[in-house]
Image (tube, grey):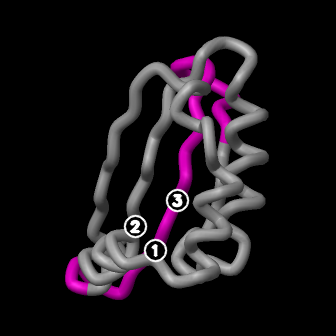
Amino acid sequence: MIIVHDIFVCKPGNASKLAKIFKEAMKGNKEVINIMTDMTGQYNRVIMVSSYENLTAYEKAFENYKNPSKEMKENMTKMQGYQDMYLTGSREIYQVW
């Protein structure tokens, strides 16, 4: 199993707003497990946690964004402007043992 953390460092005051947008837009996405905000460590972070069977499944899901379904397009509309809410981000991919 593969766990992916998409990490967004938000502008001050935007982490909870971005988390709400992600939570709404990712409804029905079976890969997304949790949307989290920081309680300790670096401030203003939103972390989207996803799970995949393997790297092939992750790559396939990523490819689907290039040719989105009607539902995916609707969810992308909900996310309009989210790029203005964060400063930087990163992605971490973990192998679960």
Residue at which label 2 appears: 3
Residue at which label 1 appears: 51
- Please tell me whether residue 37 is drawn above or below residue 58 in the rendered image: above
* Quadrant in the rendering for residue 54: bottom left
Q: Are marks 1 and 2 in contact (CB under 8 Å)?
A: yes
Q: Earlier in the sequence, mark 1 or mark 2?
A: 2
Q: Are marks 3 and 1 in contact (CB under 8 Å)?
A: yes
Which residue is found at the position 63% from the left and 80% from the top? 71
Query: Badge 3 local density, few (<14 within 10 Å), some, or many (20+)?
Result: some
Residue at which label 3 appears: 49
- Amino acid at circle 3: Val
- Secondary structure under tag 3 reads strand
Q: Nearer the viewer, residue 54 or 89?
A: 89
Residue 96 image position (x, y, % from top left): 34, 72
Query: Badge 2 local density, few (<14 within 10 Å), some, or many (20+)?
Result: many
Residue 62 image position (x, y, % from top left): 32, 71
Can I make out residue 70 in this image? Answer: yes
Which residue is found at the position 21% from the left and 84% from the top? 56
- Secondary structure under tag 2 reads strand
Which residue is found at the position 62% from the left and 45% from the top? 80
Which residue is found at the position 64% from the left and 61% from the top? 34
- Please tell me whether residue 54 is drawn above or below residue 50 in the rendered image: below
Residue 4 image position (x, y, % from top left): 39, 61
Q: Are marks 3 and 2 in contact (CB under 8 Å)?
A: yes
Q: Earlier in the sequence, mark 3 or mark 2?
A: 2
Q: Which residues fall within the magenta stretch? A: 37-56
Q: Going by the image, does 7 lie left or right of 21?
A: left
Residue 15 image position (x, y, % from top left): 69, 29
Judge whether residue 55 is colored magenta.
yes
- Amino acid at circle 2: Ile
Q: CA distance from mark 3 to mark 1?
A: 7 Å
